[in-house]
Amino acid sequence: MRGKENNGRFHLAKNLSDYAVYLLVRLAICVVQMFPLSACQSGARGAAWLLWHGIKLRRSVIEENLRTAFPHDSTDQHARIALGMWQHLFLMVAEIAHAPRKVHRTNWREHTDFPRRRDMVQRLLDTRPVVILSGHFGNFEIGGYLMGLHGFPTHTIARPLDNPYLDRFVNRFRGATGQYMLPKSGSSKQIAWLLERGGTLVLLGDQSAGAKACWVDFFGRPASTHKAVAIFTLSGQAPTIVCGVVRKGQPLRFEMRVADLIDPLEVDGELGTVMGLAQWYTACLECLIRSAPEQYWWVHRRWKGEPRKRPARRSQKQAA
């Protein structure tokens, strides 16, 4: 009986805590929406300076990641990238808050450049499914919003937020123009249904996937990556596009940049394998990140652990 009472109190406390956090976030969003984006940009610079030089949030992780990715750059160059990253993250929140009011079907050209629009639209109009791959780069949240705005609904795989109130709030923005969310776990049947019917599947491909996943080269160091992306491409015979939404100077001014795209019906050799595809899209993401390193999330640990050593007999068999 006491156990049930304790569980009930715990859940009540958690719900109250989650709701309090949700209200604070909503209040912060309201404050951001009160100010023009130029003021938000200035505020982002100040907040970035405070986090990097004052609070030093996750500073050791960021420095380690930048030393790995850019070993020949100086400490000052790393610091400039890190400071730019924090500014980018704060500005990204402001852009998400302002986008529903400022970016519409009638004025998207004022906010977005799309150099390879013809190539991408041709794939999206194909009757086969399409896989769109990006990473924690640029304003990837705006990417899904813009795709729906262009008339192309998407299904994005993402882990739900731990706070259910915030999760519903964020997903309302994501779904405003036709972006549907699929949970990272337990959505295999929905994904299979989507691929069979020629839908568009969106994934982030720059997350560590543990020791048993594919190990590919990322900035010159082995990085674990999920096999699922390549499996979706090969099993669904789905054209796959690696792209990012890169900010160009001013807030809410983007370029939808396509790094590369492939059609599994037109490739063979390494690109016809899970490992080959995983290395291809990881190299494409690296190329995007190098074009604007301050717009990448260096705060998360991309390089975790080391690839497991294969037994000698198994390695010899694979080599044969």
Image (cartoon, rainbow, N blue to C red):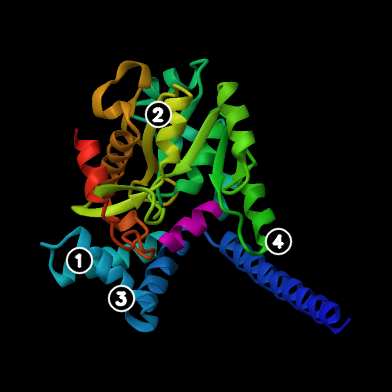
Taking the image as shown, residue 131 lies to the left or right of residue 27, namely left
Dot 3: what SS? Answer: helix
Task: Give the camera-side residue of 223 and 13.
Answer: 223
Amino acid at dot 3: Ser
Residue beneath the point at 28% across and 40% down? 279
What main secondary structure does the magenta stretch of the protein show?
A: helix
> Real-space Cα distance between discs 3 and 1?
11 Å
Instruction: Work out whether 316 lies above or below 34.
Output: above
Query: Which badge, 3 or 2, comes first in the chain's sequence?
Result: 3
Amino acid at dot 4: Tyr
> Real-space Cα distance between discs 4 and 3?
31 Å
Query: Residue at label 4?
Result: 165
Query: Residue at label 2?
Result: 240
Amino acid at dot 2: Thr
Q: Local crowd at mark 1 within 10 Å, few (<14), some, or many (≥20)?
A: some
Q: Could you tell me residue 84's position as x and y percent? A: 31, 63
User: Residues in magenta?
Assistant: 89-96
Q: Local crowd at mark 4 within 10 Å, few (<14), some, or many (≥20)?
A: some
Q: Local crowd at mark 3 within 10 Å, few (<14), some, or many (≥20)?
A: few
Amino acid at dot 1: Arg
Q: Could you tell me residue 10's position as x and y percent? A: 76, 78
Q: Could you tell me residue 247's position as x and y percent? A: 37, 48
